[in-house]
Image (cartoon, grey):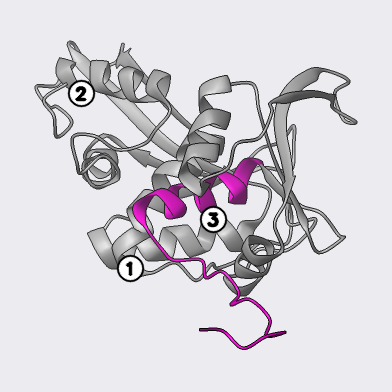
Amino acid sequence: MAKRGAKPKRREVVWSPELAYAVGLIATDGNLSSDGRHLSLTSKDIEQLKNFMQCIGKKVQIGKKKSSYTGNTTTHVQFGDVVLYDFLLGIGLTPNKTKTIGALDIPDEYFFDFLRGHHDGDGSFYSYYDPRWRSSFMFYLSFISASRAHVEWIRTELERRLKVCGHLTASTRSSVIQLKYAKAEALKILKRMYQKPHVVCLSRKRLKIAKALRIVGESLPNGK
């Protein structure tokens, strides 16, 4: 029995595949308010917002807001959670992180869940037939950030785990930096990002990837 007047035990944030995925989303499309309490996630995909709330166990109404950069209206969720906020600070996330984010303290066993969330939040995948070679189908997997330190950290982690190198490109039209992997290296990463048949993810991106892999006789773990 707790002593009268004793403070309730502080909730602990425990790592899981779902939490790691949510951290990937926060690292890309999320924001930590400077008030030390509030967090938000912005996405045009309602599924993305619902996945995020499911992963962190929140029931928050999806709202709309106008971008101060583009003037466009998009959907987002916002809530206060001091415990989760402090946890995120502890692994390396900060307010106004866009250009300053660096390495994050992600447990090894959850790195690819984090990476899947990161890619769903602000990554890209595209494929095409290369006209230079007959029947040559190419595809590329990219991770994007405005922070060079952050994409270089991801590159280092992937090289350590999978022996893939990738290459960095800086946009001439914006401040973003792209970490790109071609075909064979991309396939190695994708097999780990989707290593189980049923993982939380943005379904439209997963479907796009699965369709491309079928063309080269490959598939994601559940055969799709």
Could you tell me which residue is drawn at 60 percent across and 68 percent down? 87
Could you tell me which residue is drawn at 44 percent across and 54 percent down? 20
Label 2 environment density (alpha carbons within 10 Å; few <14, some 14–19, many ≥20): many
- In the picture, measured across the screen, residue 106 lies left or right of residue 195, that is right
Q: Quadrant of residue 211?
A: top left
Residue 173 within the magenta-colored segment of the rendering: no
Give the label on residue 96, or none: none
What is the C-alpha distance between the residues marked 3 and 1? 17 Å
Determine which residue is flagged by label 3: 151
Quadrant including the C terminus: top left
**Kind of element beneath mark 1:** helix
Q: Residue furthest bottom?
A: 3
What is the C-alpha distance between the residues marked 2 and 3? 25 Å
Could you tell me which residue is drawn at 61 percent across and 88 percent down? 3
Q: Is residue 81 above or below residue 196?
A: below
Could you tell me which residue is drawn at 60 percent across and 51 percent down? 27
Residue 101 is situated, as x and y percent measured from the top left of the image, at 66, 61
Determine which residue is flagged by label 2: 213
- Nearest the eye: 141 or 62: 62
Label 1 environment density (alpha carbons within 10 Å; few <14, some 14–19, many ≥20): few
**Magenta region, residue range:** 1-29
Q: Earlier in the sequence, mark 2 or mark 3?
A: 3
Q: Quadrant of residue 184?
A: top left
Label 3 environment density (alpha carbons within 10 Å; few <14, some 14–19, many ≥20): many
